[in-house]
Image (cartoon, rainbow, N blue to C red):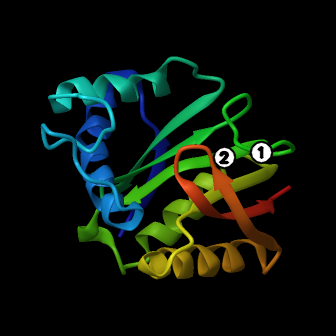
Amino acid sequence: MNIEVRLCPKEQSYILHNIYPLYLHDIAEIWGIRPNRFGIFEKEDISTLTEQSKQLDVWWGQPSVLFPYLITVDDIAAGLALVSTAPHVPSRNIQYYLSDFFVLRTFRRQGVAQRAAELVFDQFQGTWELQTNPTERNMSTQIFWRKTLNTYTGGRYTEHDGVHPEKGDVLVLRFNNK
């Protein structure tokens, strides 16, 4: 199995646009998000996936600040990782923020997500942060990140409770891979 992570060029952005609604559907259960009246997982009254897709275009608008990664397995689209840098980081003293990370269910429990996360982290050396839902309904994700970060950092990562301005309570995980 060949797992790769690469920046997704604008001309292939449609691939991430295809995956993104699946990601939102997947995390809706964890965060208790309901679709809007049009069946789209957005707060706004967005009525089509095409409209929603336009919001994702911001990731190609600042190429030295925002980094949209495509995860592939044997050249098949398998997920996404969205990495941001200042000023789009939630905390001071953080250089890199893993804003969104998602692997399609077809590729889960095969080591794809862990390897993809490591490949994403290897793209930049410095202080990283990621956040996830701290509740019981998200235990599998918490276990995944703890295991992945423990392996990747040799146990040198921190975690604490935090508050995200939109999501509310979050579990904040930080590490430095310099």
Residue under the image location 36 percent in, 54 percent down: 79
Q: Which residue is mark 2?
A: 97
Q: Are marks 1 and 2 in contact (CB under 8 Å)?
A: yes
Q: Which mark is residue 126?
A: none
Residue 20 is left or right of residue 143, and the answer is left
Residue under the image location 46 percent in, 23 percent down: 58
Crowding at mark 1 (Cα within 10 Å: few <14, some 14-19, many 20+)? few
Q: Quadrant of residue 104?
A: bottom left
- Spot occupied by residue 175 in the image (x, y as percentages of width and height): 79, 62
Tell me the quarter of the image containing the N terminus: bottom left
Q: Looking at this view, is 64 or 42 the one in front?
A: 42
Residue 172 is left or right of residue 4, and the answer is right
Crowding at mark 2 (Cα within 10 Å: few <14, some 14-19, many 20+)? many
Q: CA distance from mark 1 to mark 2?
A: 9 Å
Q: Is residue 120 above or below residue 63?
A: below
Q: Looking at this view, is 95 or 8 the one in front?
A: 95
- Spot occupied by residue 65 in the image (x, y as percentages of width and height): 65, 27
Q: Is residue 2 something one can see in this rendering?
A: yes
Q: Which mark is residue 91?
A: 1
Residue 114 is left or right of residue 16, and the answer is right
Q: Amino acid at mark 2?
A: Tyr
* Local SS, label 1: loop
Q: Is residue 77 something one can see in this rendering?
A: no
Tell how many labels.
2
Extreme residue toward the top, this view:
61
Residue under the image location 61 percent in, 81 percent down: 147
Q: Is residue 168 above or below residue 171?
A: above
- Spot occupied by residue 155 in the image (x, y as percentages of width and height): 79, 80
Tell me the quarter of the image containing the C terminus: bottom right
